[in-house]
Image (cartoon, helix red, strand yellow):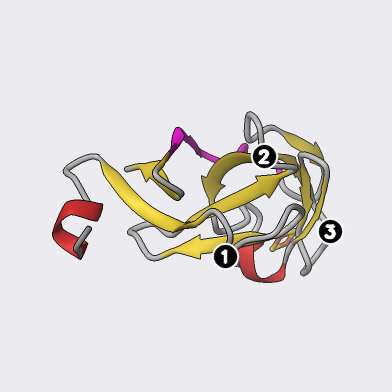
Amino acid sequence: MNSVEEETVSWKRACAVDEVAPGEATRVDHSPPIAVFNVDGEWLATADHCSHDESSLAEDGYLDGDVVECAWHFAKFCVRNGKVLSPPAREPLATYATRVDDGVVYVEV
Ligand code: FES
């Protein structure tokens, strides 16, 4: 599969399933950037930037189950629905659909 086939109009390649371990995340270059989390084999995607400021949740956040904690001021979000679980963030994160096809994780953009 070449890069043209990997990226369709609405699905963007995030990673291969074996590139991101359970409990880890990857950042997808998009505008705005997207964080894709491996929650024990379930792939969940949210906005990458913390809604409190601009911290990257994929690169600097701490994932515990389906909750990500921002590294800057420790806001917590549910990566399943984007809801704020702990301040100082007040706005929820956008969420995105994911799918796995032939060992590759895609996120809907
Ligand atoms: S930037 Fe995430 S809590 Fe402040």
Looking at the image, which residue is at 58% across and 60% down?
18
Q: Which residue is disc 3 drawn over?
A: 74
Indicate the position of residue 3 as horizontal and vertical percent values.
20, 63
Whether the magenta-drawn stretch holds residue 95 is answered as yes
> Which amino acid, by three-letter code, is at mark 2?
Val
Q: Quadrant of ligand 1?
A: bottom right
Tag of residue 79: 2
Cα separation, mark 2 vs mark 3, equals 15 Å
The magenta stretch is 90-100
Cα separation, mark 1 vs mark 3, equals 26 Å
Between residue 80 and residue 75, name the one nearer to us.
80
**Tag in front: 1 or 2:** 1
Q: Which residue is disc 1 drawn over?
A: 19
**Tag in front: 2 or 3:** 2
Give left or right: position of 32 versus 94.
Answer: left
Q: Residues within 10 Å of mark 1 (few under 14, many from 20)?
A: few
Q: Quadrant of residue 91?
A: top right
Which quadrant of the rendered structure holds the C terminus? top left
Earlier along the polypeptide chain: callout 1 or callout 2? 1
Looking at the image, which residue is at 77% across and 69% down?
72
Cα separation, mark 1 vs mark 2, equals 19 Å
